[in-house]
Amino acid sequence: MTPRWKVFVIAGLAMAVLAAAIYFPILRRRVRRAARLQQQSEVQARRELIQPVAVNPADPRVKTSLFWASDAGDSTLAPVTVELPLSRDPVPRSKQVLNTLLAGPVDAELRTLPPDAVLLGFYLLPDGTAIADFSEALATSIPSGIVSEQLAVDSITRTLEANVPQVQRLKILIHGQEAETLAGHLDLTGAFAVRSRQAQLPASQPLTAPSSEKPAVPTSDKPPASATGKLTPDKGPGKLSQPERKS
Amino acid sequence: MLLDVGNIVRIRLLSLFGTLSVVFTGAAMVVSSPAPSQTQQPAPGTPPPANPPAASPQGGMAGSAASPFSGQPQQGGLNIVVLDPAHGGTDPGARGTGGIRESDIVLDFAMQVRRALELQGFQVVQTRQGNEDPSFDDRSATANAQRGAVFITLHVSSTGLPGTVRVYVNSDLPPVTNANGLIPWDRAQAPFLGLSRKFGDLVQGLLAQRFKGSPDTSQTASVRQLRTTAAPAIAVEISSVTVDDRAQLDRMAPGVADAIARGTAAFKPTYIVPNVPGGLP
């Protein structure tokens, strides 16, 4: 005959297991929620830290071209000119321009970047390679697809090209990390050529100009690598040029 | 007395309770994280595939005579089309409000494209047959292991004018300057860009005839999948998952399949196949 207390222990244990099984999904949900809240507050803290773009009243107000989606609905970009006080220093200037681009146009339909994406950092290397670090929302909130991802990257590179002459190439990081693709399609392992002849083309020229038209464009002072005016993964010097590979 | 013992046990167990739950949570996390990769590994007892690049195509070629390793004499020229239904597995790709998943649509499209290509006399290899998600490199490896192949990756966009189709070719890559004649994997597409553009324009031209509002020539984009593919390679993106009814996309499939098959047949004479698999054109 087993002692009575053993029966109680076993019964108690069984109850505990049962209770744990019931409680487990609740606990898991709570842990997830806590993790999400923490992540949000981190992004929020960073946003607060970064967002106040130093607007210096002494900065001259200059005409700034911002590339958002064209209202033709044909997945091309159209420049919108606004007057902004912009720094002469390329790094704060790029931040000011990109934050304005992220803030979006008056017509929210013409956004190219998700409204919750934040520019976390911007650096410019001496060779003209810029590094823009965006929050994860850029990758997670963007509509997945070649056409939408290409439009997002194009809007960034063409806006930089039009307003910050020092930027030659752009490397995009997601939350400080190198990403293989933006949202499953567009290659982020290399750097995008920023300086091209595209800016000198008339504004009506669609960004996604047919490839057969390329030779018709006069090649002047630009290196052939960026001659197409497309987003060329231009592998510049330095370790950034080495794309990460899955092993 | 009885009650007392029960209470004490219960109190002790309740204090243990938190610890237990944490242990359970930890165990669940450990179990859940490696689970997706396990599906990729061969079942225990199965001998590992002798040739790693051939591992992925094996699934795709089941039941067909498409294998270049089957010992059949290979005729010169373009014989094989590697079809890549994008995404799959845990990655659904673009998702529409009506529950449409890119990964499902492209698989159905691939079946139709495959049939149309086989009618044109091509052998078709698929990078995935079901709901798997091979890596970008695995998909490229499937194409790079073939001789005389072209590569077509199929997508459905989340934006753009519904009912249109766009063909993409990889953006310019720095030229390959290796003296030993080997193509670096990172930009395996570089020597094939000219051929890819020709191929893309042919397919896009045929698609534009059927789907009004589509461009007349292929577009360029830095498509990750194309960069590591050592063959004439294009991405075909159908617009879009935003349609209310899946049938709208399904109705496009025969036209897309026919355009791709006829475009590939038209491209065949211009592609002189390299002597070695993955060799320079």
Image: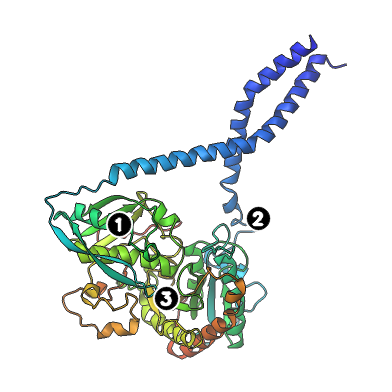
The image position of residue B165, as x and y in percent, is: 48, 78
Chain of residue at mark 2: B
Q: Is residue A101 left or right of residue B112?
A: left
| Amino acid type at image mark 3 | Tyr
Q: Nearer the viewer, mark 1 or mark 2?
A: 1
Tag 3 near tag 2, CB within 8 Å: no
B138 in relation to A117, above or below: below
- Tags 3 and 2 on a common chain: yes
The image position of residue A2, as x and y in percent, is: 84, 17
Residue at numbered disc 1? A240
Please state which of residues B103 and A55 is positioned toward the viewer in this rendering: A55
Q: Secondary structure at mark 1?
A: helix
Mark 1 and mark 2: Cα distance apart in space: 38 Å
Q: Secondary structure at mark 2?
A: loop
Q: Locate residue A210: give its quadrant.
A: bottom left
Residue at numbered disc 3? B168
Chain of residue at mark 1: A
Chain of residue at mark 3: B
- Tags 3 and 1 on a common chain: no
Tag 3 near tag 1, CB within 8 Å: no
Residue lying at 74% horizontally and 27% vertically, measured from the top left: A15
Residue at numbered disc 2? B43
